[in-house]
Amino acid sequence: GDSVTQMEGPVTLSEEAFLTINCTYTATGYPSLFWYVQYPGEGLQLLLKATKADDKGSNKGFEATYRKETTSFHLEKGSVQVSDSAVYFCALTQGGSEKLVFGKGTKLTVNP
Amino acid sequence: SQTIHQWPATLVQPVGSPLSLECTVEGTSNPNLYWYRQAAGRGLQLLFYSVGIGQISSEVPQNLSASRPQDRQFILSSKKLLLSDSGFYLCAWSIGFSDTQYFGPGTRLTVL
């Protein structure tokens, strides 16, 4: 079945550091890919998405590019802030499917 | 714009007691609705989804049930809670089986 693998956390960075959170997937067909963010005590918020190969999703300084050849959707940000501290989930869905398949999440802590 | 509400925000219940969690969506019609559970160390698990009033599909056999009495209302219930039912319950909606699901703020359930 379809699956998503994220890098193990937690990740701890200093403010203004560069962030990469790796995500790879296994899926038949051509899934849509997502990054969701969960701030402490809150629900999930959609951060960005990409629906086809070579698409780049971006939002709030975060970026991720849909790489079909490497089945990856790595999340990057050039300069993190303390307010970016949260848990980040990579996910996929196949067209016409009710299932959103999540990775296990990566906890990011940014220190001042 | 669309909004999704969940209540209560937190709940502490004894083992064997009943449960009712409610989710409502505003600003859209005939959404697909979903219940997820986020348990410690286990990621996000899809429990139920619904494509219309009275239509419920279960993903995981358990002592929980779901109902959709109105177009934009989704209820998660149990007759007798187990310790293993503790977790963070998230409701989500989407337009059909389109690719993006939007999540509510969640309910933190602790069963003692």
Image (spheres, rainbow, N blue to C red):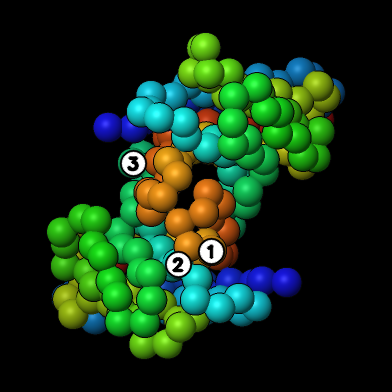
Q: Chain of mark 2?
A: B
Instruction: Judge whether A85 appears above or below A56 on screen.
Output: below
Q: Is residue B27 above or below residue A7?
A: below
Query: Which residue is depicted at the point 52% across and 37% down?
Result: A32
Write the residue at 66% across / 71% down. B2
Q: Do labels 3 and 2 touch, CB within 8 Å? A: no
Mark 1: few/some/many CA within 10 Å (<14, 14-19, 20+) = some
Mark 3 or mark 2: name the one nearer the start of the chain: 2
In what element is the residue under mark 3?
loop
Residue A50 in the image: state x and y as whole percent: 62, 35
Above or below residue B62? Residue A4 is: above
Three-letter code for the amino acid on which mark 1 is drawn = Ile
The numbered disc on residue B95 is: 1
Residue type beneath disc 2: Asn
- Mark 3 lies on residue: B42
- Circle 1 — which element? loop
Q: In the displayed structure, does residue B51 sit left or right of residue B30?
A: left
- Chain at numbered mark 1: B
Would residue B89 be seen by someone viewing this image from the given angle? Answer: no
| Quadrant position of the N terminus of chain A in the picture | top left
| Mark 1 vs mark 2, CA separation in Å | 6 Å
Image disc number at residue B32: 2
